[in-house]
Amino acid sequence: MHLGTSITPFGHHLAAWQKNGSVNALRFDRISEQVKRAQDAKLDFVLFADNFGHRPVKNLSAQTVPFEPTTLIAALATMAGKIGLIASAAMDLHEPYNLARRFASLDTISHGRTGWNYIAASASAKAAEYIDVVSRLWDSWEDDAFVYDKNKGRFFLPEKMHVLNHVGENFTVRGPLNVNRSPQAKPVVATLLRSQTLELAAQKAEVIFLDVSSPEELKSTLTNFHEALDRTGRKRSDIKILVNIVPYIGETENEANKLRQELSGLIEVNEQTSGIELVGTAQAIADQLEKWSELVDGFISLSPFLPNGRDPFIESVVPELQKRSIFRSEYAGQTLREHLSLPRPAHPATAMREQAS
């Protein structure tokens, strides 16, 4: 089972800040503490969403984090040395070259623990071209391009530098990047599945986040995605599918229900947090996750409330899953791809040479 968590200062419920509000929760050190606890629990990754700087009009956004995500994970990578770090970035707000360079830099800084959660408005040809350009820019250099040969005066091997020279319908990008390939070769590409971007996700994403509200919706969404995946010719084993869950946890089911009702009573409009709500004890929630793990590869926790900045899911449900031996107790690898059991992509030039031989 693969597990991640989406980081927010107060929790994902709109009223979490009212129940546990403190300006101190917005500080970098408080957010880094959450990441370190997630790492101590051996989670695959932490995810940082982005509200693109929009100020709240009435209620505080449940996803409010007072930092730009890629800047934030650059700092976190130096403080948490094992856990994966996934940042959201919208295609409409960044040129392909600049985004590719930024995430390649983050992947080098983190020693191969970075992921890009792309946000696309639609499954357009422009969006597909954008992802292709970014991915090919990440292949600007082969793994062994830099030889640092002082005797011969060769810093790198020119034949192992690949200039993109892309001229497409929507983008013209020369390249190359000035960033080496990382230990995992290139950042992991993730996305939140939407009906309007289903085909794009099936073609390009390596990690899929599912935002569904019930087991029935989960099954129908999986059917639609598997059909789209078949149309692309990609293998199901090349992709990890994780479901958003919203866990309300208590010593008893009544206690968990009371927390849910209390939070909902603090806001005028009960806008549900995205994901399947799970209400009950840690053991009961672990039972559900174990059952659903037959359908999907794992889950991403959107904890509705963080008492004193501590995540009940990490502190109660994760140990229960570890006790059942269905989630790791130690990291087996170093990179995000290793955490997620995703293959390290070979450089296209290397793959071509191997085929030719």
Image (tube, rainbow, N blue to C red):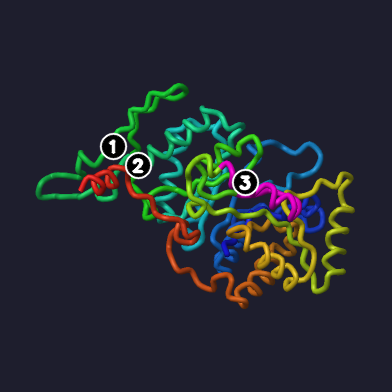
The magenta stretch spans residue 88? no
Amino acid beneath label 1:
His
Query: In the image, residue 52 lies at what x, y percent?
Result: 63, 37
Residue on which disc 3 sits: 49
Query: Which stretch is magenta?
Result: 209-228
Residue plotted at (59% across, 44% down): 227
* Residue 203 in the figure: left or right of residue 302: left
Q: Earlier in the sequence, mark 3 or mark 2?
A: 3
Closest to the camera, between mark 1 and mark 3, is 1
Labels 1 and 3 touching (C-beta < 8 A): no
Query: In the image, residue 218 lies at what x, y percent?
Result: 70, 52
Residue 74 in view: no
Which numbered tag is attached to residue 162? 1
Q: Residue furthest top?
A: 169
- Vertically, is 138 above or below 164? below
> Helix, strand or loop at disc 2?
loop
Label 1 and label 2: CA atoms lie apart by: 7 Å
- Within 10 Å of disc 3 (Cα), the crowding (few <14, some 14-19, many 20+) is some
- Vertically, is 315 above or below 11? below
- Quadrant for residue 309, please give it: bottom right
> Helix, strand or loop at disc 3?
loop
Query: In the image, residue 142 lies at what x, y percent?
Result: 28, 46
Amino acid beneath label 3:
Ala
- Quadrant for residue 225, please give it: top right
Residue on which disc 2 sits: 139
Label 3 and label 2: CA atoms lie apart by: 26 Å
Q: Nearer the viewer, residue 174 or 122?
A: 122
Q: Residue furthest left?
A: 151
Q: Residue furthest bottom?
A: 323
Which numbered tag is attached to residue 228? none
